[in-house]
Amino acid sequence: MTSIEVLTSPSLVSVNLAATEPRGVIEELAKLLEADGRVTDVPSYVDAVWAREQETGGTGMESGIAIPHAKSPSVLRPSVAFGRSEAGVDFGAEDGSAADLIFLIAAPEGEDDLHVRVLSRLARRLIHEEFRTALREAGSPEAVYDVIRREVEL
């Protein structure tokens, strides 16, 4: 079974996203995946994620969370990138809250339901305020990674 350590790393974490709109955030996080050798074609992958966002009305959740995700032939291996936005970004949460904690889940085309499992486990942990607070207070990509590694079991 895949562990969270295989899916993410400190190099896939941004503690200060520059983008201020959803598509820009997705692109910024996808570039981290590309730099780490996990995505081969950023525009194609971003298009896949964006199409899913449009189809679902957005992946924003309560409490400042968004989990955009998609399967794509551009994804070489299942991955999770994380970004934190100081200003918050509107990912269409029902309660109208802007997301400051954004997890981008990338899955290869034809992959099993791993991305659904990851999404489910993340969502289950993110309902806990202590986890969200720890992510918000972590001062570096390494510290964020440590929080995720400690809290999210697959």
Image (spheres, rainbow, N blue to C red):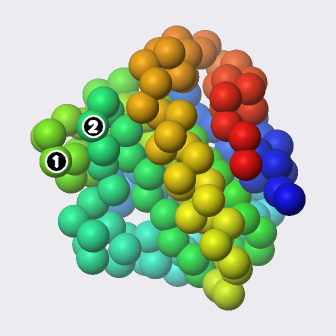
Left or right of residue 142, residue 15 in this image: left
Number of marks in picture: 2
Q: Is residue 41 visible?
A: no
Q: Quick one: label 2 or label 1, which is nearer the N terminus? A: 2
Circle 1: residue type: Glu
Q: Is residue 96 above or below residue 30?
A: above
Q: Is residue 45 above or below residue 118?
A: below
Quarter of the view holding residue 31:
bottom right
Left or right of residue 10, residue 90 in this image: left
Q: Residue at x 55, y 43 (%)?
A: 122
**Image quadrant where one finds the N terminus:** bottom right
* Residue matched to label 1: 94
Circle 2: residue type: Glu
Q: Secondary structure at mark 2?
A: loop
Q: Can you tell which mark lies on residue 62?
A: 2
Distance (Cα) linking label 2 and label 1: 7 Å
What crowding class fits label 2: few (fewer than 14 Cα within 10 Å), some (14-19), or many (20 or more)?
Answer: some
Q: In the image, residue 33 lies at what x, y percent?
A: 67, 57
Q: Residue at x 70, y 58 (%)?
A: 79
Q: In the image, residue 100 lies at what x, y percent?
A: 37, 32
Q: Secondary structure at mark 1?
A: loop
Task: Kindly indicate whether the residue at mark 1 contacts the one at mark 2 (C-beta within 8 angstroms).
Answer: yes
Left or right of residue 34, residue 58 in this image: left
Q: In the image, residue 16 lies at what x, y percent?
A: 49, 28
Q: Residue at x 21, y 52 (%)?
A: 92
Q: In the image, residue 78 lies at what x, y percent?
A: 72, 65
What crowding class fits label 1: few (fewer than 14 Cα within 10 Å), some (14-19), or many (20 or more)?
Answer: few
